[in-house]
């Protein structure tokens, strides 16, 4: 048995209490251990991704209990890709938090950050639905603390909304799990895939309800319209590095939809027919449109970025909702892109705030460090709006190509292309107001100049942008890799066989005899 | 017994949803508590209702109760209890900070925040 699979969960789980207990008064030691932990996790994630890149599936049985009885962690191509994306994002976000001094403005930033990573890693790696709920809670509990890091009335008010909305989501998740367990008697994903397929057409009421409830829960996490209302306020009010890390949190919802609705409730299943094309696809198209219109309508830069995250998540889910291998491959390529682009824009909005004092989209005197910040904003906006030459354009092209030939091709092409134009106008307006109009306004003599952002902040943003550029330059290999991921997802038999047929304690009697 | 438990879950859920929709911190937190009670009982019944049956395999026993939902409920109770404590503290902080216990965005305070 390969013990490395659990390392991304265990390492932050040990690092966080160490930071709280041993280093709580020494910000330098906290920073060193936090960065070292994330670097080690990047190494582990690279190792795992390399091990599964040949299509093998790694299994970890906790306590050596065999699959339907014990909890398993499963690493396949999809989960290791998400793990790798998360830790790379986490490294640059952490560098930014250290460079900008955000981690000193409240207590226990690094410990909560590590717990957040633990929850994210577990959610990507688990092979059990109830365990997925538990890891969702771990990442949410850490995110509640990070969300209100550094305090302030507006932030705590937004935090209360965020916590309450997610508590309702968790309750819904439990209702879904209860109905699934009542219908099938198992919560292991591979076991569920077998048992759901055996349910006859006459007894589908319970499992239909459960699958819709589960989709609702993941849609809340992925901020699909009309379940997106928690996102703009909480992401705009959260500290910038936290908001940048949260760019991966909506993708957890997307990941869960991909995993559960290819493995347990695939499209050809009669029980849940219509769920994907009749419900998820229109909702995704509407969230794409609303997100991009929100970009144009936003009065403040942080809200603009939050709406662009909703829009790009809509784009991901349009591609997911096609539920074809080409669609999933395009969605995964776009997931990598939109996570990085969203994080870059959140960090840039903090650079603007540092040099300007506020984020209102009104003409104001030039900010400290305008030229570099403006250049970064230009690159981030091009990426998010999906213009050539960056990866947003390629991702959109892959999506349009995947949608070609489906029944709803006219709708998908129209919404994607028109909303791209709207978001382009929104970003162009924001950029020109923030960086160009300011030069026509004289700087008041009396005001003290606001501080220049620290060099490490620029290094962190530049690092994220370079990953984004790498995602563009190596688009060919990455897309062929996401195509192999999609192929693996649409042939779940090896996954199910690996999980259920690996012997352990309490294996079925045929293995023992 | 099934009717009693099912209607209890239904009434608690309905009451919880009504209170959550009141959009003031105190009723919303009460509503969340009711919802979590409802979901805990719901999880408990997802293993079917049996009375006086052992959960562990034994000789000469044919009717068992399912032990797994009880473990699931325990996890759910711990998480929801902790989360209720967190949200009470944060709600109190938000109320003391801004002297307003609405949980939704108020239009006039939004304009003030944006200035």
Image (tube, coloured by chain):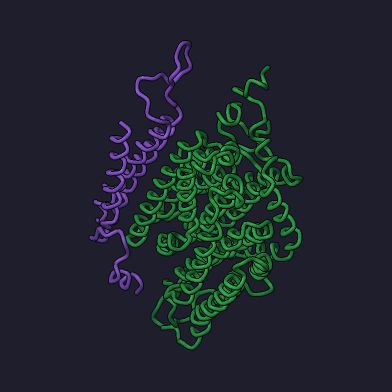
Chain colours: A green, B purple
**Residue occupying the far front of the picture:** A202
Q: Is residue A422 left or right of residue B73?
A: right
Please state which of residues A98 and B53 is positioned toward the viewer in this rendering: B53
B43 versus A250 height, above or below: above
Q: Is residue A494 left or right of residue B81?
A: right
Please state which of residues A252 and B99 is positioned toward the viewer in this rendering: A252
**Place of residue A388 in the rendered image (x, y in percent of width and height, measured from the top left):** 67, 74
Please state which of residues A174 and A433 is positioned toward the viewer in this rendering: A174
B3 versus A29 height, above or below: above
**Place of residue A96 in the rendered image (x, y in percent of width and height, measured from the top left):** 54, 59
Residue A447 shows in this picture: yes
Identify the image quadrant of the N terminus of chain A: top right
**Residue occupying the far top of the picture:** B59
Identify the image quadrant of the C terminus of chain A: top right
**Place of residue A52 in the rendered image (x, y in percent of width and height, measured from the top left):** 72, 44
Residue drawn 48% across the image and 40% down it:
A180
Residue drawn 43% across the image and 73% down it:
A300
A503 versus A27 height, above or below: above
């Amino acid at each position: 048995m390969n013990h490395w699979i659990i390392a991304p969960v265990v390492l932050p789980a040990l690092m966080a209490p160490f930071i709280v207990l041993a280093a709580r008064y020494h910000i330098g030691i906290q920073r060193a251990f936090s960065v070292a932990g994330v670097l080690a996790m990047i190494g582990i994630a690279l190792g795992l991704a390399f091990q599964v890149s040949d299509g093998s599936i790694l299994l970890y049985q906790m306590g050596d209990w065999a699959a339907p009885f014990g909890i398993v962690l499963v690493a396949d191509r999809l989960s290791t890709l998400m793990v790798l994306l998360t830790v790379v994002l986490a490294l640059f976000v952490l560098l930014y938090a250290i460079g900008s001094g955000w981690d000193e403005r409240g207590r226990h930033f690094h410990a909560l950050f590590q717990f957040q990573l633990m929850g994210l890693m577990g959610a990507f790696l688990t092979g059990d639905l109830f365990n997925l709920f538990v890891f969702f809670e771990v990442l949410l509990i850490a995110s509640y603390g990070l969300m209100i890091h550094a305090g302030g009335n507006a932030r705590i008010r937004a935090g209360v909304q965020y916590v309450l909305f997610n508590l309702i989501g968790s309750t819904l998740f439990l209702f879904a799990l209860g109905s699934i367990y009542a219908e099938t008697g198992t919560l292991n994903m591979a076991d569920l895939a077998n048992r759901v397929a055996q349910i006859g057409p006459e007894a589908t009421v319970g499992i239909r309800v459960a699958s819709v409830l589960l989709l609702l829960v993941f849609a809340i996490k992925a901020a699909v319209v009309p379940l997106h209302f928690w996102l703009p306020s909480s992401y705009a009010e959260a500290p910038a590095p936290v908001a940048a890390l949260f760019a991966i949190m909506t993708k957890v919802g997307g990941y869960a939809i991909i995993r559960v609705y290819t493995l347990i409730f695939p499209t050809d299943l009669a029980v849940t027919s219509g769920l994907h094309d009749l419900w998820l696809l229109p909702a995704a198209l509407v969230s794409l449109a609303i997100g991009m219109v929100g970009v144009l309508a936003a009065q403040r830069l942080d809200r603009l970025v939050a709406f662009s995250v909703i829009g790009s998540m809509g784009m991901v889910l349009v591609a997911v909702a096609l539920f074809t291998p080409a669609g999933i491959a395009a969605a995964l390529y776009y997931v990598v892109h939109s996570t990085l682009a969203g994080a870059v824009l959140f960090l840039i909005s903090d650079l603007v705030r540092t040099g300007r004092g506020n984020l209102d989209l009104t003409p104001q005197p030039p900010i400290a460090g305008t030229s570099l910040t403006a250049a970064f904003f230009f690159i981030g906006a091009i990426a998010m709006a999906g213009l050539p030459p960056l990866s947003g354009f390629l991702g959109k092209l892959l999506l349009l190509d995947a949608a070609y030939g489906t029944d709803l091709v006219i709708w998908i092409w129209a919404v994607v292309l028109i909303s791209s134009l709207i978001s382009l106008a929104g970003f162009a307006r924001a950029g020109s107001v923030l960086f160009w109009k300011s030069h026509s306004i004289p700087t008041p003599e009396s005001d003290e100049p606001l501080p220049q952002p620290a060099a490490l902040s620029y290094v962190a943003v530049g690092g994220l942008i370079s990953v984004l550029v790498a995602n563009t330059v190596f688009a060919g290999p990455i897309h062929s890799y996401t195509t192999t991921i999609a192929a693996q997802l649409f042939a779940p038999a090896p996954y199910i066989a690996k999980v259920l047929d690996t012997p352990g304690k309490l294996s079925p009697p045929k293995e023992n005899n | 017994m099934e009717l009693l438990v099912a209607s209890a879950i239904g009434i608690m859920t309905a009451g919880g949803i009504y209170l959550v929709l009141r959009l003031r911190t105190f009723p919303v937190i009460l509503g969340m508590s009711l919802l979590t009670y409802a979901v805990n009982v719901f999880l408990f019944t997802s293993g079917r209702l049996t009375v006086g049956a052992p959960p562990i395999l034994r000789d000469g026993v044919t009717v068992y109760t399912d032990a797994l939902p009880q473990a699931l409920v325990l996890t759910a109770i711990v998480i929801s209890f902790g989360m209720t404590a967190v949200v009470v503290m944060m709600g109190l902080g938000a109320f003391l900070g801004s002297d307003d216990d609405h949980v939704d965005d108020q239009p006039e305070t939004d304009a003030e925040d944006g200035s």
